[in-house]
Amino acid sequence: MARHNKFNLQYFPLDVTFFDDHKIVQIEEQTGVQGGYIAIRLLTMVYADKGYYLDWPANFEFTAAKRIGNGITGAVVLELVEKCLHHGLFNRQIFETNGVLTSVGSN
């Protein structure tokens, strides 16, 4: 029996300088270490879903909060997504036009 094709990633490399990236530094400056943690959780959702983007339908922040756990609320997730978009961790134009989270890439 053949294996099913996979469209997501099973792991992704995390640079040892991830927390030194100016985007993450700015996010954590505004939200504390919790913001860095949620950013990583969002990245894992992006990579686990389709491999490079995450569909973000209306009110998905509540689903994301449930998946993140640790008492994180939908409001906190939504605030963090906005900060990630503002600081360029995720692409705002694609988010607003297509309703998906995807990273901008290396800058």
Image (tube, helix red, strand yellow):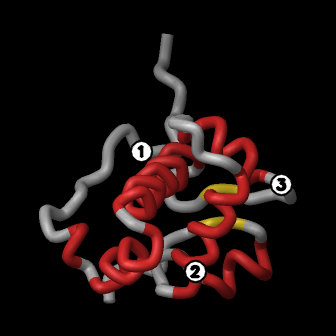
**Front in this rendered view, residue 36 or 3:** 36
With respect to residue 72, does 22 lie above or below?
Answer: below
Residue that mark 3 sits on = 59
Name the residue at 72% across, 42% down.
63
- Residue 101 located left or right of residue 18: right
With respect to residue 11, does 100 lie above or below?
Answer: below
Residue that mark 1 sits on = 9
Can you give x and y, in whole percent of width and height, for residue 106 in the image?
Answer: 32, 82
Q: Compute the Cα span from label 3 to label 1.
A: 25 Å
Report the amino acid beneath label 3: Asn
Label 1 neighbour load within 10 Å: few <14, some 14-19, many 20+: some
**Front in this rendered view, residue 22 or 94:** 22
Name the residue at 32% across, 89% down.
107
Nearer the viewer's eye, disc 1 or disc 2?
Answer: 2
Callout 2 secondary element: helix
Q: Earlier in the sequence, mark 3 or mark 2?
A: 3
Q: Earlier in the sequence, mark 1 or mark 2?
A: 1
Can you give x and y, in whole percent of width and height, for residue 96 in the image?
Answer: 76, 80
Callout 3 secondary element: loop
Report the amino acid beneath label 1: Leu
Residue that mark 2 sits on = 85
- Residue 11 located left or right of residue 68: left
